[in-house]
Amino acid sequence: MSAAISINGISKCYNIGLRFQPYDTLRDTIMQTLKNPFRRFAEMRKRGNEFWALKDVSFDVNKGEVIGIIGRNGAGKSTLLKILSRITEPTEGFAKIRGRVASLLEVGTGFHPELTGRENVYLNGAILGMHRTEITRKFDEIVAFAETEKFLDTPVKYYSSGMYVRLAFAVAAHLEPEILIVDEVLAVGDQEFQKKCMGRIQQVASGDGRTVLFVSHNIATVRKLCDRAVYLRGGKVMNIGPSEDIVAEYLNSQVGADEKNLLARPRFPGITPAIAGFTCSPGQGADHLVSGSAATFEVEMDITEPIANAAVTIMFNSDQGYRILAYSSRCEEGRMQLPRGKHVMKCHVDALPLLEGRYMVDLEIWGGDREADYVEHAAVMDVGPGDFFGRPETLLRLEGRVLCRSNWNFEPL
């Protein structure tokens, strides 16, 4: 089978800690060079703080294949997709791409708030590489997919965030490329719309036989969509193979992660990490809990700038990557004001409603309308068997992973 994409030794280096100046005119550049011809070399010598986002990445993607790229934040997944989408150039190596490429890297890029939904469909479609006749032919299908028929002639600045995202994804999802590059865009909208997005990606991949590169932190989605997977860590390819095997290797690699290194994790530009650690109540530890027992989870925070309207969320994922349980201060306490300094947020659970098994813990702090910090796989929890219902006979095998109490009555009709 011929390769649609051949990636050969791609590396990407960034110089971090530099203060970039505004762009100079040609006249300014010439004058500065004449005044100080060695200035450029002096600046280059200062650029010793290098960060390799990717290092010697090589693999092939076959025509018609759906391949997933997984790894923790900062592994280099998005950087690789930006190189393949020709948004940025590699420092070393090259990639051969055979076919028309469309990228869904950031939904809504190119939307203008003053234009109506109808006008933005044509504008965004043109930016994504669609011809006007192609957009017109698919216009009704796009609008029906987004469910925004009533608001087509309203400027999108008046749209809710959900409507905006639905329309933006609908335009991007109706491209007809030979190669589709998707970066975490299925995590948009409500649950019902995410299912629709998933169905559309599956149709593109299986029904139309196009090549798809898919990046997601949702391991269950990778299992479902992808034939093969690439595991990236620290900018390097750790393994490539069947998605089931690679996902299992990735999840196993998270076991025993050092929670003290949370502050040193890669973060998005402009965001200072706030989550400093995660522990359970004294004497328990995060590595072993008992189903049905009381537990207190502690999220340690070192906040450098005050966070207004904050909410802290603790999320539990199964060893197969499914999000199955979450505790959020937004639901219990509402929004909070987190001042500068070191703090501990405690979440007490009277009876842990998880069956025996291994769980990955994600942590999130949401401040106002943006994510202030997020830690994927902050800890791994092993939950042992316990007596959740107060009846020893209920320790038989149960379906599902979350336990909850209920009342049952038998009444004749």
Image: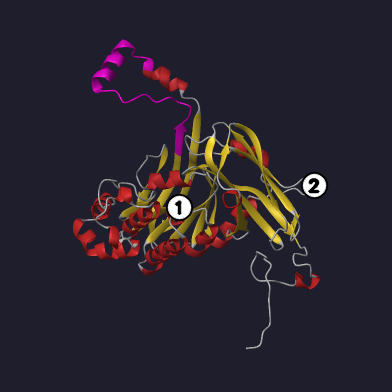
Residue 374 in view in this figure: no
Q: Residue at x 34, y 47 (%)?
A: 109
Coordinates of residue 254 in the picture (x, y in percent) = 63, 50
Amino acid, disc 1: Glu
Nearer the observer: mark 1 or 2; the answer is 2
Amino acid, disc 2: Gly
Residue 210 in view in this figure: yes
Task: Pick the residue in front: 76 or 271.
Answer: 271
Coordinates of residue 208 in the picture (x, y in percent) = 35, 67
Q: In this view, does 190 lie above or below 157?
A: below
Q: In this view, does 18 lie above or below 63?
A: above
Q: Is residue 21 above or below residue 266?
A: above
Q: Which residue does the numbered mark 1 point to in the structure image?
A: 184
Q: Which residue does the numbered mark 2 point to in the structure image?
A: 283
Task: Pick the residue in front: 302 or 220.
Answer: 302
Q: In this view, does 192 lie above or below 80?
A: below
Q: How crowded is mark 1: few (under 14 residues within 10 Å), some or many (20 or more)?
A: some
Coordinates of residue 239 in the picture (x, y in percent) = 55, 52
